[in-house]
Image: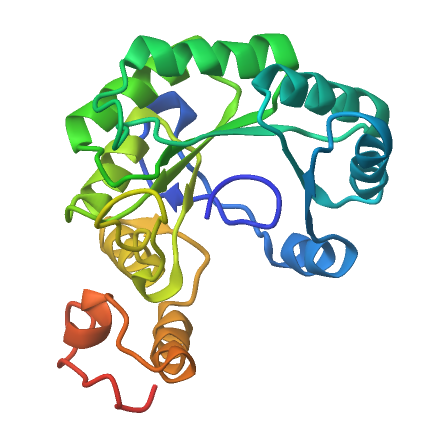
Amino acid sequence: MGRGGPDHRLHRDGPSAAGPAGPHRRDGRRAAEERLVSAGHAFVAGGTSGINLAIAHRYASEGWAVSVLSRSQDKVDAAVTELARSAGAAVNFSLSCAFGCPIEGDVPQAAVLAWCERAVDEIGAHGVTLCDTTGMAYPTQVLALVSAFRARWPQTELTLHFHNTRGMGLANVLAAIDAGADRFDASLGGIGGCPYAPGATGNVCSEEVVHALGWMGYETGVDLSMLLGAARRLQGLIGREVPSQLLKAGTRLEAPRTPASPA
């Protein structure tokens, strides 16, 4: 959910908790439908040169979201820059482990901002995604990093990707909103994980984020009852309960429902 593309940005009546870059709502349903019909997501391994770069260019020119995969960061940067120039494609730069690494531990804020500088100022990315891949972020850390990013790049679209591994996912979302983040990744039912982060759990739960923001006065443009119904159905599709606490307890003013209860 957020600003631009097929997503919803948030809107709150009166002063925004997110300051000058605070969220507002846009009607993204039509854009979502058009994008689902006209484009997909292509992952091109070795798409930094030769025929694979040509394949990546073809996808990008047709409106697909393209992820270029290579072991060389310099080659990826060069290929993405070329794709953006020749295909007229917008670039979003995603940084994994921006809040902590299972191998190196803490990731200095200066190091993250240096990568953002490379993405925005050198490559020309229109947006950046800061990923808490390992679920190590905490609210004051998020507030500091997002504030520093927004102070330097006030017009660049900023997305946050949080996992709820240590129970701080929703608190991190709220901290990021206060600092001026535009968009958030979330998953239905809170499912997900990470193969290289020990003990990793799912992303922040879509319905819990929508529920919390609704009570805080934000208009997300998402129908919470339909979202909860989809989460209940998801449990049957995957054959297990999902992590969503909201699905178990019900919304703030309704009686708890069991996972088997009808939507």
Quadrant containing the C terminus in the rendered view: bottom left
Q: Residue at x 34, y 73 (%)?
A: 228
Q: Residue at x 78, y 20 (%)?
A: 82
Q: Residue at x 25, y 41 (%)?
A: 135
| Camera-nearest residue between 90 and 25 | 90
Question: Is 70 situated left or right of 170 in this image?
Answer: right
- Name the colour scheme: rainbow
| Camera-nearest residue between 73 and 124 | 73
| Camera-nearest residue between 119 and 181 | 119
Where does the image place residue 200, in percent across and percent down from the top left? 26, 49
Count the numbered circles shown.
Answer: 0
Where does the image place residue 20, in percent across and percent down from the top left? 39, 22
| Camera-nearest residue between 101 and 175 | 101
Q: Residue at x 15, y 67 (%)?
A: 252
Question: Is 109 situated left or right of 11 in this image?
Answer: left
Give the quadrant of residue 229.
Answer: bottom left
Above-or-below relation of 244 to 105: below
Give the quadrant of residue 223.
Answer: bottom left
Where does the image place residue 261, in percent across and percent down from the top left? 26, 90
Question: Is 135 situated left or right of 127 in this image?
Answer: left
Give the quadrant of residue 102.
Answer: top left
Q: Is residue 91 visible?
A: yes
Where does the image place residue 154, in percent across and percent down from the top left? 46, 16
Q: Is residue 153 visible?
A: no
Above-or-below relation of 256 to 71: below
Above-or-below relation of 212 to 260: above
